[in-house]
């Protein structure tokens, strides 16, 4: 834990950030008995072994081993409380770090090892080997230290079975860390991409873990999860889902339980209902949910779209990637897109945390307070469809991640409040010919820019002139307000919103927004997105669905056709 009584650190290292940390306790929240750190390639330039050898010699070692820095992990700081050593905790912690590295895609592990108490010999039992010529005395440790390496392909020596078991259990271990307030995030099963893990290692869990009980490894890990005490609720309605699947394919069978039961037996084809489909583990809620296989799940989930969106169009919609920037107003858009099956791959960006004042318009709960809005949205979307592919950026859209975020998008939904980001995103979207949709949450104003069809179109239809993002990096609060007013056309905003701008920072803490307007915005952006992605009628422009004009006595269709 390396902490001082005043909350500081006695041995603070930048390398601690972006690393996996495994702490052993007798019970959740109890005092630590042991600890080990696993550093990922994301911080490879700071590895202790690299500092020990020097950059040139370190790179020479990797070349000699035939691996790259992106395939090399470092384990360090193995510490066991002396009274707990008789438990064999050191071996278990070492196996945890090695198993995690194997699960995360390492090809080589490297680290420094002391020699005075036989630490190097201890690591050799895990198939580590000392590198000749690297042993030297280190005054800080008052002993000789040697560099040791472990090749994943070479196995784990006498602890191979333990390491393999902990490798397969890694999703559960990571989920356990999150459940007791740790920092580990849970990557999707089978998707331990190095970059994704490095990005997620510091935030709360937001992706489900999918288990296939027909796979012996998944079955073993799932059984461990069920025995762990982490599962608060098991929800298994697979037979009812199978019945819905059968009736969605053959609607004439509704009301005929005998024929449905016969079809169910045929659908299972000898597989136990418990082993059919996937089990989705949601670490943030402690729920374990049994669902149909992906394609069958989606067929049933969107079955009632038919008649408005037929199955060929549904498949086309799913085969798209959508980015949503700004997950306050954008939360409603993202949720509606997921509900309608518009896109199966999403990128979400928001730097802001959910606050109490957001509860007037965001579909979330008090348990979500102080959680990043992109995390909340991803969780909500995964609870609709655990098979989605979602990437989040909890630092928002920045100069550093802008290109990566927009690359590969078929549509951008832009709902942020920062003028620089609004323009920078559109500049890049225009260059990549990505259409942009924006709801302004006032008078039902929907803004559409078809850069896919009009790559020379002025940004924001030219309403703010030829302004570049570079000119917007440093704006005063008043300049920011003035620019946003120009963007949304100050002459056409509602009287209430126009009046509120003069009160910002005095009698109002921010501009007014209502849940009804946010919900309408989600509907409008989904409608536009569906038309754009299916090649329907959705031109560039600004369109208003204004309740103040639509719900009036003069607009009453019954009154117009009947005597008063």
Image (spheres, grey):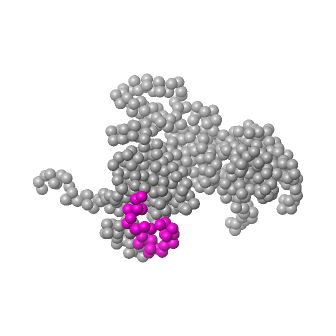
Horizontal side of 397 relative to 130 (left or right) equals left
Identify the residue at horizontal 45%, vertical 42% (top origin): 318
Please give the count of numbered marks on the rendered protein.
Answer: 0
Does 470 appear in magenta?
Answer: yes
Q: Position of residue 466 (x, y in %)?
A: 43, 67
Can you see residue 96? no
Residue stretch in magenta = 456-485
Can you see residue 414? yes
- Given residues 347 and 427, the one toward you in this image is 427
Horizontal side of 420 relative to 24 (left or right) equals left
Horizontal side of 533 relative to 552 (left or right) equals right
Q: Residue furthest front?
A: 456
Q: Position of residue 188 (x, y in %)?
A: 58, 44
User: Image height check: is 306 above or below 45?
Assistant: above
Q: Position of residue 184 (x, y in %)?
A: 63, 52
User: Image height check: is 66 above or below 436?
Assistant: above
Does 462 appear in magenta?
Answer: yes
Quadrant in which residue 481 is drawn: bottom left
- Given residues 392 and 467, the one toward you in this image is 467
Q: Position of residue 23 (x, y in %)?
A: 70, 52
Identify the residue at horizontal 39%, vertical 49% (top origin): 532
- On-image quarter of the N terminus: bottom right
Identify the residue at horizontal 39%, vertical 37% (top origin): 311
Identify the residue at horizontal 37%, vertical 58% (top origin): 447
Q: Residue furthest left?
A: 563
- On-image quarter of the C terminus: bottom left
- Given residues 252 and 129, the one toward you in this image is 129
């Amino acid at each position: 834990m390396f902490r001082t009584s005043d909350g500081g650190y006695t041995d603070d290292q930048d390398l601690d950030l972006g690393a996996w940390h495994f702490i052993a306790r007798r019970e959740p929240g109890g005092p630590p008995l042991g600890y080990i750190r696993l550093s990922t390639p994301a911080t490879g330039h700071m590895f202790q072994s690299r500092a020990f050898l020097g950059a040139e010699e370190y790179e020479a070692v990797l070349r000699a081993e035939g691996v790259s820095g992106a395939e090399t992990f470092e384990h360090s700081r193995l510490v066991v409380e002396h009274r707990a050593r008789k438990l064999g905790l050191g071996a278990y912690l070492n196996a945890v770090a090695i198993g995690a590295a194997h699960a995360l895609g390492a090809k080589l592990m490297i680290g420094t090892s002391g020699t005075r108490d036989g630490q190097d010999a201890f690591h050799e039992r895990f198939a580590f080997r000392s590198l000749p010529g690297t042993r030297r005395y280190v005054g800080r440790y008052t002993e000789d230290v040697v560099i040791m390496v472990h090749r994943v392909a070479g196995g784990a020596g006498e602890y191979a079975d333990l390491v393999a078991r902990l490798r397969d259990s890694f999703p559960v271990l990571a989920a356990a860390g999150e459940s007791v307030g740790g920092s580990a995030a849970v990557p999707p099963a089978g998707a331990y991409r190095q970059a994704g893990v490095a990005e997620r290692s510091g935030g709360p869990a937001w992706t489900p873990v999918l288990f296939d009980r027909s796979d012996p490894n998944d079955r073993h890990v799932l059984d461990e999860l069920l025995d762990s005490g982490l599962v608060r609720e098991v929800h298994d309605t697979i037979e009812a889902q199978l019945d819905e699947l059968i009736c969605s394919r053959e609607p004439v069978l509704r009301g005929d339980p005998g024929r449905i039961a016969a079809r169910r037996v045929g659908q299972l084809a000898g597989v136990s209902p418990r082993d059919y489909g996937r089990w989705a583990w949601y670490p943030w809620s402690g729920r374990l949910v049994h669902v149909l296989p992906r394609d069958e799940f989606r067929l049933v989930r969107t079955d009632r779209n038919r008649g408005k969106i037929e199955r060929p169009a549904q498949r086309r919609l799913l085969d798209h990637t959508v980015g949503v920037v700004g997950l306050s107003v954008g939360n409603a858009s993202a949720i509606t897109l997921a509900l309608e099956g518009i896109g199966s791959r999403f990128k979400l960006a928001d730097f802001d945390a959910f606050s109490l004042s957001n509860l007037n318009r965001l579909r979330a709960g008090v348990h979500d307070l102080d959680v990043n809005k992109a995390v909340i949205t991803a969780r909500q979307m995964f609870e609709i469809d655990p098979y989605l592919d979602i990437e989040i950026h909890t630092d928002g859209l920045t100069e550093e991640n802008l290109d990566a975020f927009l690359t590969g998008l078929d549509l951008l939904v832009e709902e942020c409040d920062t003028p620089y980001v609004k323009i920078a995103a559109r500049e890049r979207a225009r260059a990549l010919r990505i259409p942009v949709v924006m709801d302004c949450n006032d008078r039902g104003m929907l803004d559409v820019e078809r850069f896919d069809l009009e790559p020379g179109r002025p940004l924001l239809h030219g309403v703010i002139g030829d302004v570049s993002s570079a000119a917007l990096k440093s704006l005063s609060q008043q300049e920011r307000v003035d620019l946003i007013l120009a963007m949304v056309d100050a002459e056409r905003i509602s009287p209430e919103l126009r009046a509120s701008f003069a009160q910002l920072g005095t009698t109002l803490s921010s501009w007014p927004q209502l849940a009804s307007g946010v919900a309408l915005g989600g509907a409008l952006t989904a409608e536009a997105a569906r038309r754009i992605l299916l090649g329907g009628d959705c031109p560039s422009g600004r369109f208003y669905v204004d309740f103040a004009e639509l719900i009036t006595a003069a607009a009453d269709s019954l009154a117009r056709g009947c005597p008063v």
